[in-house]
Image (spheres, helix red, strand yellow):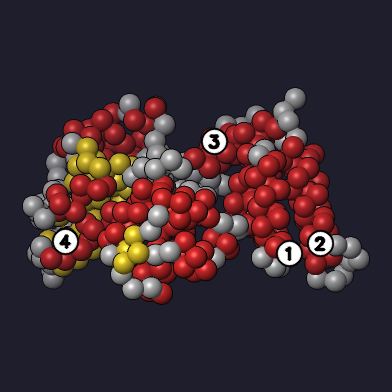
Amino acid sequence: MQLAQAQLEKHLTQGLQSLYVLVGDEPLAQRESLDAIRAAARVQGFDERTSLMVERYFNWQQIQTYGQSVSLFANRRLLEINIPSGKPGVDGGKALQALSNKPIPDATVIIILPKLEREARNSAWFTALEKQAMTIAIDEVDAAHLPKWIAHRLAQQGQHTSAQTLEFLAHQVEGNLLAANQEVQKLGLLHPQGELTDATVREAVLNVSRYDAFQLGEAVLAGDTARTVRILQGLQDEGENAVAVMSPLMWVLRPLVRVKQAEMRGENVVNAMTNARIYGDKQNLMKRALARLSLRQLEAALQKLADIDKTAKGVMLGDAWLEISRLCFGLSRVRGR
């Protein structure tokens, strides 16, 4: 059975099921769903929680061992299995099917998955999970519905504002629910219940939530020149340090270079991305960048960042921000041949 996140808390008051599956990439929704299940488990007498992270070479025998073990101190147990790649492999698939067919006594299991591609959704292991588990869709909120989402969050803390101000808030956070929730909570701390004027909200909301270097890296990878320029300008206007911007760019470009090198060697690109700890929707972003940018361009970009770092630290002469802007703009406007 599939359940929307908004329906989860009402469902949990009726008691926990033996198996839950959270599917989706939205971090705030995932965290809040997990917190809701954990809170319900505490109320209902669960005394022990175990969390497992499925990475390369994960030993799936742990699941069977957990099911066969008996806790000396807990009557009911909570087991969380996080699979960030969304690909458990052959052994993992068998283990998840076994878990679906034979629940662990006196335990509730939560399987945490990213947004799955069609192949994974049609797999035997996920089909088995869907039949037996309560599946919770962790969906992102699109731009059109974000003002309504913010209004609902404000209402939960006894506040409301105009449609125009809600649009302003939505525009400031650029679809980032974590940032949106942070701004809503800030308004709850700064102001009493009741109506929030446009001026009050504008004064409280910091533009820094709109511009960060990680968003800049994503815009560059996507080849979105307009957004790249907008974020660059915003970071500069806010007085962001050039060195603080370069580190996230390095973290974006370095794995991209490794994946591009693997592609040039004829290796499987998806496997290379998984090995580089690139999961979910970020793989689609990476594929678009791989199609646009050559290995020579990427290696030159890394070298340029190293030079800009020296400039920012005063080792080399030049304007670090100007060079960052030129580099990001140049990479974003490259089109695949």
Q: Residues within 10 Å of mark 2 (few under 14, many from 20)?
A: many
Closer-to-camera residue (286/265): 286
Residue drawn at x 19%, y 54% is 9
Residue 201 x, y percent position in the rendering: 47, 64
Q: Earlier in the sequence, mark 3 or mark 4?
A: 4
Determine contact: label 1, label 2, CB under 8 Å: yes
- In the picture of the structure, the residue carrying the numbered disc 4 is 41
Q: CA distance from mark 3 to mark 4?
A: 36 Å
| Amino acid found under the numbered disc labelled 1 | Ala
- In the picture of the structure, the residue carrying the numbered disc 1 is 242
- In the picture of the structure, the residue carrying the numbered disc 3 is 284
Q: CA distance from mark 1 to mark 3?
A: 28 Å
Secondary structure state at the residue bearing disc 4: helix
Residue drawn at x 71%, y 61% is 236
Residue 263 x, y percent position in the rendering: 65, 33
| Amino acid found under the numbered disc labelled 2 | Ala
Instruction: Give the quadrant of the C terminus.
Output: top right
- Rendered image quadrant of residue 136: top left
Q: CA distance from mark 1 to mark 4?
A: 46 Å
Tell me how many marks there are. Answer: 4
Q: CA distance from mark 2 to mark 4?
A: 52 Å
Q: Earlier in the sequence, mark 2 or mark 3?
A: 3
| Amino acid found under the numbered disc labelled 4 | Ala
Q: Earlier in the sequence, mark 1 or mark 3?
A: 1
In this view, the mark in front (1 or 4): 1
Q: Residues within 10 Å of mark 3 (few under 14, many from 20)?
A: some
- Rendered image quadrant of residue 139: top left
Residue drawn at x 10%, y 62% is 44
Secondary structure state at the residue bearing disc 1: helix
Q: Earlier in the sequence, mark 1 or mark 4?
A: 4
